[in-house]
Image: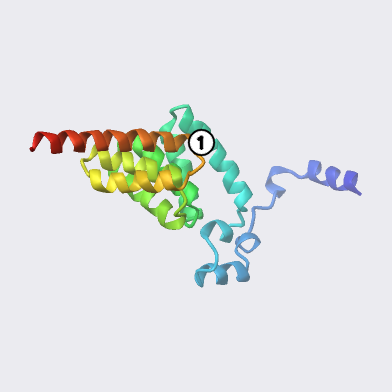
Amino acid sequence: MAQAVAEQVVELKPDEVRDPQITDTFSPDRVEAFIMGEATLGQLYGITIEEAYSVAELGFTLFEQGRLKQAQTLFQGLVIGNPYDAYFHSMLGSVYQRQGFTEGALEEYSLAIALDPASIESYVNRGELLMQNGNFEQAAKDFKHAIELDPDRGNPGVNRARMFASVISAALQATLSGNK
């Protein structure tokens, strides 16, 4: 049976290959779930979360290689298809941060934190940007959240938060000492 199917596939000419039909993907149930807000665009298209995370893995590799425009394209697509996934927002924030798009990065980190209040990297990265912009009070709060989320000190990102928090503390101490 499998051989007969394989022979049929081989015998198809290019003009005989059937293009996917919209009804193959957009079943009435999927469309209704999407319209009702019960399904994401990714689910409407039939993309599983496993497939989305495979794309995210490629995006992360591109990010690590410094291929930021390509990583940005992938993570923007993932955010559009899966807007409730904190990791996708956090990674898009990281891509924006590395490109110097501070406002976009802050927005993506804030969305990631709203979706997953345990997103340590989002707190640390947002705190770093806030600190760079002179918003020391909010940065300190983000670093404190990150530190509290890692009581066992197992997350390397939290070491950055500890370092940044000590920098803020030293700067405030110096400022207060100079005002006396």
Q: Nearer the viewer, residue 180 or 43?
A: 180
* Above or below for 54 versus 85: above
| Front in this rendered view, residue 16 or 110 | 110
The 10 Å Cα crowd at callout 1, few under 14, some 14 to 19, many 20 or more, is: many
- State the image coordinates of residue 141 (x, y, percent, origin top left): 32, 48
Q: Residue furthest right?
A: 1
| Left or right relative to 79: residue 44 | right
Q: Is residue 4 left or right of residue 157?
A: right
Residue shown at the point (64%, 53%) measured from the top left = 19
Residue at 49% over, 38% down: 153
Residue in the image at 43% along x and 51% along y: 112
Apparent side of residue 27 relative to residue 103 in the rendered image (left or right): right
- Direction from residue 56 to residue 139 in the image, left or right: left
Expressed as whole percent of the image width and height from the top left, the position of residue 1 reads 92, 49
Q: Where is residue 94 in the image (x, y as percent from the top left)?
A: 40, 39
* Tally of marks: 1
Q: Is residue 61 above or below residue 86?
A: above
Q: Which type of secondary structure does the marked residue at label 1 adopt?
A: helix
Q: How is the image coloured?
A: rainbow
Q: Which residue lies furthest to the left in this view?
A: 180
Q: Position of residue 95 (x, y in %)?
A: 40, 38
Q: In which quarter of the image is the C terminus?
A: top left
The kind of residue tagged 1 is Phe
Q: Can residue 101 be seen in this view?
A: no
Residue at 52% of width from left, 32% of height from top?
Answer: 61
- Furthest toward the top, the residue is 65
Residue 67 seen by the camera: yes
- Tell which residue pokes out farthest to the front in this image: 180
- Report the residue marked by disc 1: 60
